[in-house]
Image (tube, rainbow, N blue to C red):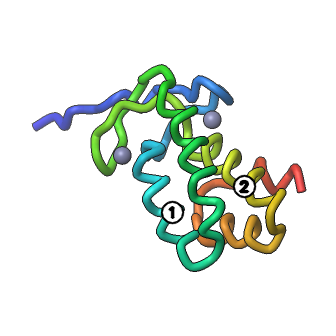
Amino acid sequence: MKAQIPGWEANCIICGVSITNPICVNCLEKEIVQWLLTRDQEAIPMVKGITDFFANDVKKTNCIICRAEIGICTCCYINEIYELLLQRDIGLAQELITTFDFDFSFIEAMI
Ligand SMILES: [Zn+2]
Ligand SMILES: [Zn+2]
């Protein structure tokens, strides 16, 4: 039986990279908020603001966790969170990257 192939060829509308590990901003936000609870609670409303900004985007593929439609890659979202934390606490920003083990090669190139 042939498995149904979802839109793996979908590309991020921000950076253009193909979305290989689609997780929607709401699922990511849940993880990040949980992580911030013990670290920087004041940053949580700001993270939610970033989520709202990304949540309006074009839909191209489906989240592997909740099946919501998404149009941006994990990196673009996490990168925004990273920039936010960088302004607050450099150590926390670096911890974000090691905790959320995605493909951060392009961020590392920027440091
Ligand atoms: Zn992207
Ligand atoms: Zn999701």
* Disc 1 to disc 2, C-alpha distance: 13 Å
The one of 9 and 12 positioned closer to us in this rendering: 12
In terms of secondary structure, where does tag 1 sit? Answer: helix
Q: Nearer the viewer, mark 1 or mark 2?
A: 1
* Label 2 Cα crowd, 10 Å radius (few <14 / some 14-19 / many 20+): many
Quarter of the figure with the N terminus = top left
- At x 47%, y 53%, the residue is 28
Quarter of the figure with the C terminus = bottom right
Residue 8 pos. (x, y %): 41, 32
Residue 42 position by quadrant: bottom right
Residue 92 pos. (x, y %): 74, 71
Residue 82, label in figure:
2
Looking at the picture, does residue 19 appear above or below residue 98? above
Q: In the rendered structure, which amino acid carries the disc numbered 1? A: Val
The one of 91 and 105 positioned closer to us in this rendering: 91
Residue 33, label in figure:
1
* Number of numbered discs visible in the structure rendering: 2
The one of 71 and 57 positioned closer to us in this rendering: 57
- At x 51%, y 24%, the residue is 57
Residue 87 pos. (x, y %): 83, 57
**N-terminal label among 1 and 2:** 1
**Along the horizontal axis of the image, is 73 left or right of 26?**
right
Looking at the picture, does residue 80 appear above or below residue 38? above
Ligand 2 closer than 8 Å to label 1 CB: no
In terms of secondary structure, where does tag 2 sit? Answer: helix
Residue 40 position by quadrant: bottom right
Residue 62, label in figure:
none
